[in-house]
Amino acid sequence: MKFSRRVIDTPPYLFHLIDEKRKAVEQKGIDVVSLAIGDPDRPTPNFVLELMEEEIRDPRNHTYPSYKGEPDFCRMVADWFEKRFGVRLDPAKEIMASIGSKDAVSHLPMVFLDPGDCGIITDPGYPVYQAAIGFAGAEAARIPLLEERNFLPDLDAIDPELAYKAKIIFVNYPNNPTAAVADVSFFERLVAFAKKYDLVILADNAYSEVYFEEQVRPISIMQIPGAKETAIEIHSFSKTFNMTGWRVGFVVGADHLIQAFLTLKSNFDSGVFMAIQRAAARALSHPQVLAFGRERTKLFKDRRDRIAAALRTSEFRFQLPLASYYFWVRVPDKYNSSVTFCADLLEKKGLVVTPGVGYGPSGERCFRISMTAPDERIDQGMRRLQEFAKEI
């Protein structure tokens, strides 16, 4: 039996490997605290569940959905987008539903890349960006995200030959894994860069609603004049409403970009279950949504501050997260490998964090901590990390 090159050449998914290592340690009878995966520990809010109960009993929602997304889904997303970002979108042409943001991330490169082409990704970055470019038969070129630049890529340092060769560039702000945010100035430079080199920007904005201070409230690249013609922005309900298992999101962009994505996607699947579409879209304007957002912000800000205090006590180096669920932390100087550090931490203290090299070579000296565990498990995990720091 022979497998395709896309399977042979693609490494196992990072979080699958982490889960397997966690299970192996648990089988030894060790209580393992996992602060590795960004899956919200709180349930989907009741008001979303109530909306879903209504929609799932509606017989109209049990037929094949629209490949592009139901018209009322697109209309409600457009209303939310204008209120949230001040950007008007044509719901009939410039919005498309997706089966979560990972669906869009993994398929969009196939819209623009042929075998032998090139796409640019940031390093460190979400591992699926590289895999998706590889599945299209193309080459992924990495550009570094450096702490001294607040984890924003230096667009001026990109070789013009590479920029002209590339057809897409992935960006992700708020960023996973570094928790950095991008401002208007950066997105203006990025749009100008994309137009100069005829690139399509794939802007992953899955964490747009997870932030801690109003002054760093994440923006949309669509707020930049001209961005709509050269960018597709990817959104998710997973983090916004603790709906990771529901698998629903959307993409926005100019009509010709959305239509190209629709051509590809309509040959892969039959769209998002209509009951989920309508429940998710209605949740965006629900009377309880603001209170839920404030509660979530307080929860994660409290967790952030407790984790930061614990890291400072043990003299770990990090930047305080401005958004997303993550801390990006330097491994102690004793370690040259994030994998070795994380493996020792798991074996000796039963604590799972994510090795930074899993996000690219630039992450070799870092590890990622997720805030999406119950408070008592986070506190347990921080005590174990502090104990480990004293022992090394």
Image: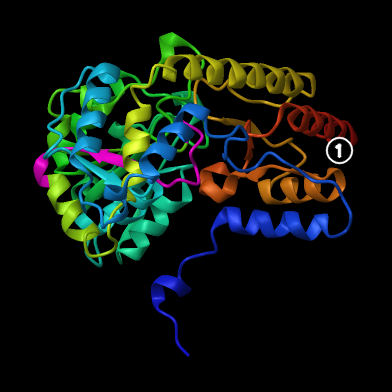
Q: Residue furthest top?
A: 215
**Span shown in magenta:** 239-256
The local secondary structure at tag 1 comes to loop
Q: Is residue 168 magenta?
A: no
Pick whichever, 235 or 50, lies toward us: 50
Residue to which mark 1 is pinned:
392
Q: Residue at x 51, y 16 (%)?
A: 212
Q: Position of residue 210 (x, y in %)?
A: 48, 25
Residue at 43% in and 29% down: 174
* As drawn, 339 above or below 373: below
At horizontal 44% and vertical 18% (from top left) the residue drawn is 288
The residue nearer to you, when weighing 122 against 201, is: 201
Q: Residue at x 36, y 57 (%)?
A: 132
Q: Looking at numbered disc 1 in the image, what kind of residue is underneath it?
A: Ile
Report the magenta stretch's main SS: loop
| Residue 245 on the magenta span | yes
Say whether residue 354 is visible. yes
- Which percent across, then down, holds residue 338? 67, 46
Q: Residue furthest bottom?
A: 1
Q: Is residue 196 above or below residue 3?
A: above
Is residue 158 rendered to the left or right of residue 38?
left
**Image quadrant in which the C terminus is located:** top right
Is 46 on the left or on the right of 109, as rendered? Answer: right
In the image, residue 375 lies at what x, y percent?
72, 26
Q: Residues within 10 Å of mark 1 (few under 14, many from 20)?
A: few
- Find residue 164 and report its horizontal and vertical position in percent: 18, 48
Q: Is residue 175 visible?
A: no
